[in-house]
Image: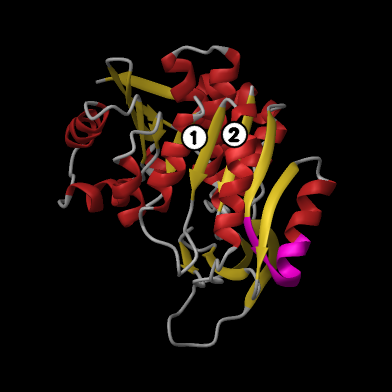
Amino acid sequence: MNVLTVTLNPCIDKTVTVSDFEKGKTNRTLSVRSDIGGKGINVSRILYEFGVDTTAAGILAGDRGRYIEKALKESGIKTCFSFTDGDVRTNMKILDVTDGTMTEINERGFAAGNAYALLLDELEVLLPNFDIAVISGSIPSDLSSSVYAELISLAKSKEVKAILDADGMLFKEGSKAKPFAVKPNLSELENYVGRKLSTIDEIAAEAKKITCKGIELVTVSLGSEGAVFVGEGVAVKTTPFPIEVKSAAAAGDSMVGALIAAMDRGMSFIETAQLMTAAGTVTASKEGTTVATASEVFESYKRIKYEIL
């Protein structure tokens, strides 16, 4: 299996760890670390850990962009990026070890300029070489909210399965193009349906409505509560094993990577749900945007409890 990930607005993730974070006051750091980031890039990183062929594509800018490209290549991940003016954004993540909460302050990032058109030309040629395209994360400020629908349609026209992981209008508009799978978290799903979802049954019902629109798999991540999976005529709720949360920054991206790894191995629907939940759980136990290794996930996924709804 060969997988393309598309990250239109990459970043450097700077994670600051504090104790008893106090808003409006001076807080002293316990530790600071920086990692290359962006949802699609994170997916490529975990796919590489799983031994799945992957190419990271998208838009980069400036010295930080060149650093990201170099880091990916040095780690063995193939790249296809268009460059634009400006520089890649830095996202600040403040982890309070006292209660495990994370506060994120994300910059908007660069304007794409003509780099998006150049990337589209590249993808037009490259996509037939791939089985799956992962389209995820935020977008540059000058691109339309319909951009993911365009990319999904392009992928489907090349007979490539598309997986969408985005929020707000990007999720709403992208879903209209009927990707193979979507992975909203609970707040993103609530934003999409326009109301609070208080029970697992309500969450599963709304996810099922999305599958009725032509999307084959809907995964709703619930953080420490696990996830709801709807597809193949089945709805499943998973419950993770207990961990000490160190950073949930790349947990959702790890779930997407694990989905593809499960597809690559021909795993069952239940096993796929367990593997995805285990990948997100193990990644959340690591610092910064460090992702789970394949051995960690495969050694632990059977510990994930599940309930057929």
Q: Which residue type does callout 2 highlight?
A: Leu
Residue nearer the viewer, 257 or 123: 123
Question: Mark 2 touching mark 1, by CB under 8 A?
Answer: yes
Give the image location of residue 71, x and y in percent.
79, 54
Q: Earlier in the sequence, mark 2 or mark 1?
A: 2
Mark sitting on residue 127? 2
Magenta stretch in the rendered image: 59-67
Image position of 25 with respect to 89: above or below: below
Res. 241 in view: no
Image position of 78 with respect to 248: above or below: above
Give the number of callouts. Answer: 2
- Is label 2 in a helix, a strand or a loop? helix
- Is label 1 in a helix, a strand or a loop? helix
Give the image location of residue 116, x and y in percent.
55, 58
Mark sitting on residue 180? none
Q: Residue at x 81, y 55 (%)?
A: 70
Q: Which residue type does callout 1 highlight?
A: Ala
Does the stretch in magenta take in 11? Answer: no
Give the distance between the C-alpha atoms of the residues marked 2 and 1, in whole angstroms. 7 Å
The quadrant of the image that shows the C terminus is top left
Residue nearer the viewer, 119 or 179: 119
Q: Is residue 291 left or right of residue 156?
A: right
Image position of 164 with respect to 263: above or below: below
Residue nearer the viewer, 252 or 20: 252
How would you classify the magenta stretch by its main secondary structure? Answer: helix
Q: Residue at x 47, y 58 (%)?
A: 138
Mark sitting on residue 155? 1
